[in-house]
Every structure is written in structure tokens, then in C-alpha cells.
Amino acid sequence: MQYILASSNGMPRTRTLSDDTVLERAISVFWQNGYAGTSLRHLTKATGLSTAALYHRFIDKDGLFVEALRRYADDGLVERLARLSASDAPLGAIRDFLDELIAVSLADPRHRGCLLVNTALDGATMSRAARDLVRARFGEVEAFFAERLERAVNSEMLDPTTDIAATATALLGTVFAIRVMARLDPAPRRLRALADHAMAGLPKPRKIKSKGSRR
């Protein structure tokens, strides 16, 4: 797609620039500054788009933010959830999800955390579309946890009385905790402790005493 790009001398210039490139650059800006802290000037400088081109393609800042969020979530969640959902080890898949989350968090030298989590915690006013997108993507993660937990219960890996919905929500809370802690204090030991605690707290099957056992 052709965009009108801003230039240093104020003269507009036309160049083919893909939406992928624009969104990648916008993600970096929103991720670093947050929604409220990102101005149109930040976006035009980072993307190379003129204000007119940005408005023509994305309507406004919020429109670009929603598309950037969607791309970020697609890149970070779609492949991972599909791959881990195909695992034959339901509890192992949950553990792998948390371990991969920790690895991704520790790999970021700027400790920016997760754009989705940051947005959920951001008190800035933004569109319903942005809020709904964040809610839906976290819903996908929670559903992944619930499906793995249900499979674990059916395979007698967890107690049959396990409250699957509540446990899935608690695991989602662990995701938030890992991502927030990674921004504030990215110590590998502390992040792994969060994952260890979450996994250790899953209700294991109760051992049934034999009739001949002593009390």
C-alpha cells in the first residue's frame, strides 16, 4: 500500500510501505510508552507516516492501537496456544506455557512486560474495541487453561472435584503476576517461584486408603 510519508524538510513523499511494517513500528512505540503516553507525533516519527496517511488508513490513534494490539496478540499467542493445545500432557502444557512466558519476559532487555497486560492495567481512556480485544485474548488463554485442566481431571491427574473455572482464572492471575513482576523485578528465581507455586497448588487426586489400612 502506498502511504504519504513525512520528511525532515516538510515535503511529503510517497513510498510503498506495508501494513506489517507500520504495525511493527507502532507496536514498539505503544509498548514502550503505553497508550496514554503515545502521541501522534511519536507515531508519525516511528512509522514514517504523515498524520494524513495515518488517519486515512487507521482513522485515528485508537484505530492504530487496536490493530497493533491485534497483531501483537496474534504473534504472541496464536502459535503458542495451538502448539501447546496439541500436547498429550495437559499439565505439562500448562507448565510449558508458564515457562515460555518467563523466558520471553527475561529475554526483553527493556523489561517492557506484556502489551496486553500493560493495556489491561492502564488507566487511560481508550475505545471499547481496544478493551474488548484485550478481554477476548485473555479469554483465549483462560480457555486454554480450562481445557487442559479438564483433560487432566478426565485423565485422573487432578482431583475430580477440581473447580476448573476457578483454577483456570487463578492460572490467568499467575500470568498477570509473572508479566508485572518481570517489569518491576525481573529476577528469574522469583518468576519461576510464581510458576512453581501455581503448579504445586493444582489439586492432585486423593489417595484412597485400602480397607485393611490402619488409621
Image (cartoon, rainbow, N blue to C red):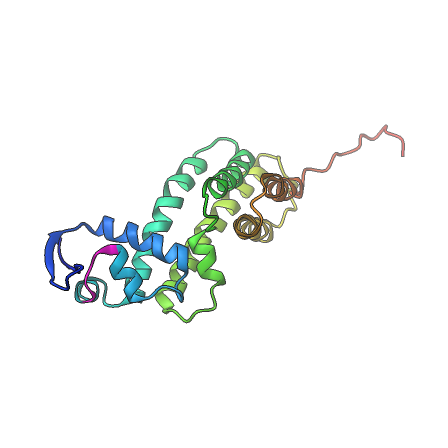
5 and 174: which is toward the camera? 5
Q: Residue at x 41, y 64 (%)?
A: 131
Residue at far right of view: 215
Q: Magenta segment range?
A: 47-51
The C terminus lies in quadrant: top right
**Residue 29 against residue 92 in the figure, above or below:** below
Q: Residue at x 49, y 38 (%)?
A: 103
Q: Residue at x 50, y 62 (%)?
A: 121
- Is 108 positioned to the left or the right of 75 in the image? right
| Residue 69 visible in the snapshot | no
146 and 184: which is toward the camera? 184
Q: Residue at x 47, y 45 (%)?
A: 144
Location of residue 156 (image quadrant):
top right
Q: Position of residue 170 (x, y in %)?
A: 59, 51
**Residue 50 against residue 204 in the figure, above or below:** below
| Residue 87 visible in the snapshot | yes
Residue 32 counted in the magenta span: no
88 and 197: which is toward the camera? 197
**Residue 113 against residue 208 in the figure, above or below:** below
- Is 154 positioned to the left or the right of 11 in the image? right
Residue at far front of view: 9
Q: Position of residue 175 (x, y in %)?
A: 53, 49
**Residue 22 against residue 158 in the figure, above or below:** below
Q: Position of residue 109 (x, y in %)?
A: 46, 43
- Classified by dominant secondary structure, the portion drawn in magenta counts as loop
Residue 50 counted in the magenta span: yes
